[in-house]
Image: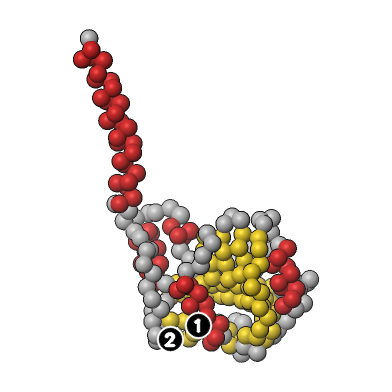
Amino acid sequence: MRDYLKLPTILSLMSLSLIFVTPAQAQRSAPCSNDNQEQPSQARREITNEEYGLRFEIPANYRTELRRETDSRQRLSIAVRNPTDVAFLDCATRNRMIGAGHQVSDVIVSIEPRPRHIRNVRNILQDAAESGGISRDIIDPNFTTISGQDAVIYTVQTTYPDRSKNARLIHPNGQDIITIWAGDYGEDIDSIDLEVMDIIMSSFRID
């Protein structure tokens, strides 16, 4: 009788072993990874947007993706993407991985209509501090110029948590706001993303 009682116990232990081992095995066998971001190349190439007269440089080994939102924001975005993330998303598409885009942190240049209550860059900073339902801290705000236009650069840390660095200015047409953005989940922004953001800001021109 004791031998028969041992069998369910052994089977239960085997089941528990499978439960704990399987996720680790699945993680090791993940077909796609975007670890170890590629360093920006020293060579540069120019990105232009004739619609808004924007020009800026990016590392030659990076790629861009144009996005246009047709909702109430009517925002145009240019995502600047690390080659490692480009390969990762291609792999994710081939392997039908859902939600892979959330693992990619692009540097983004966007332009959208200026809200009526924003008339200068100080209004932009005030709006950033007050907008959204998530608690946030505005860190190290700095008023400067980008392409000869008044601009404000600041970091946002939310309790979500996520962290982003923003450079924002009003387009010379007076109708739109330009944002150069880098960010990620957690409390740190990848140093490579910040380097690429600096390259964009230092070369940014509005014709």
Task: Look at the picture and state if 159 lies above or below 11.
Answer: below
- At x 28% / y 20%, what residue is drawn? 8
Q: 10 Å neighbourhood of mark 2: few (<14), some, or many (≥20)?
A: some
Q: Taking 87 as reference, is 156 left or right?
A: right
Q: Taking 10 as reference, is 141 left or right?
A: right
Q: Position of residue 148 (x, y in %)?
A: 65, 89
The quadrant holding residue 179 is bottom right
Tag 1 secondary structure? helix
Q: How far apart are the two marked residues, 1 and 2, measured between alpha carbons?
A: 9 Å
Q: Residue furthest top?
A: 1
* Amino acid on which disc 1 is placed: Ile
The quadrant holding residue 75 is bottom right
Task: Look at the picture and state if 38 lies above or below 186.
Answer: below
The quadrant holding residue 39 is bottom left
- At x 37% / y 73%, what residue is drawn? 38
Q: Can the viewer see residue 195?
A: yes
* Amino acid on which disc 2 is placed: Arg
Answer with mark 1 or mark 2, whichever residue precedes in sequence. 2
Tag 2 secondary structure? strand
- At x 38% / y 54%, what residue is drawn? 96
Q: Can the viewer see residue 66?
A: no
Q: Nearer the viewer, mark 1 or mark 2?
A: 1
Q: Position of residue 177 (x, y in %)?
A: 67, 76
Label 1 with label 2: CB-CB less than 8 Å:
yes
Quadrant where the N terminus lies?
A: top left
Q: Position of residue 62 (x, y in %)?
A: 42, 77
Residue for badge 2: 44
Instruction: Judge by depth and name the residue closer to the eye, 91 or 105.
Output: 105
Instruction: Judge by depth and name the residue closer to the eye, 71 or 162.
Output: 162
Residue for badge 1: 199
Q: 10 Å neighbourhood of mark 1: few (<14), some, or many (≥20)?
A: some
